[in-house]
Image (spheres, helix red, strand yellow):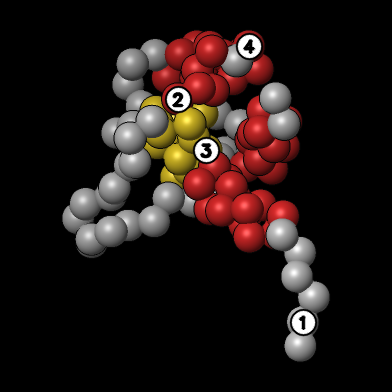
């Protein structure tokens, strides 16, 4: 017998979609669901995250993109969009954006 918390499975799904690192479907292919964008985040060790494309219209996320443009231009070392900030900062920002 357990206690049911109806919001917990939904919250877990949100974490899997927005915050947790992207998962590889195959060793050579990484699946990015429709409506999402893959970004690399971290200062030294880069971790891949999936974010909804709706973030692109948010001023906080646009500030991160501008910072990425200033640091990397169009030459991103990971081959994809690299956001130059700490992972915990990125997670805090995305949790704020999830609340909007």
Residue 67 visible to the viewer: no
**In this rendering, would 7 be left or right of 81?**
right
Which mark is drawn over residue 53? 2
Q: Quadrant of the C terminus?
A: top right
Label 2 vs 1, first from the N-terminus = 1
Characterize the local packing of mark 3: few (<14), some (14-19) or many (20 or more) Cα atoms within 10 angstroms. many
Residue at 66% of width from left, 52% of height from top? Answer: 11
The crowd level at tag 4 (other Cα within 10 Å; few <14, some 14-19, many 20+) is few
65 displayed left or right of 93: left
Residue occupying the point 54% across, 13% down: 57
What residue would you read off at disc 1? 2
In this rendering, position of residue 98 left or right of residue 45: right
The mark nearer the N terminus, 3 or 1, is 1
Which of labels 3 and 4 is toward the front?
Answer: 4
Mark 4 lies on residue = 59
Q: Tell me, for residue 41, which label it has, or none.
A: 3
């Amino acid at each position: 017998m357990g206690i049911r918390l109806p919001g917990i499975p939904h919250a877990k799904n949100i974490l899997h979609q927005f915050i947790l690192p992207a998962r590889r479907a195959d060793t050579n292919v990484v699946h990015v669901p429709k409506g999402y964008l893959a970004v690399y985040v971290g200062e030294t060790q880069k971790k891949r995250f999936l974010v909804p494309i709706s973030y692109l219209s948010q001023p906080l996320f646009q500030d991160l993109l501008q910072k990425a443009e200033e640091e990397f231009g169009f030459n991103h070392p990971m081959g994809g969009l690299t956001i130059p900030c700490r992972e915990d900062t990125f997670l805090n920002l995305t949790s704020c954006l999830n609340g909007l």
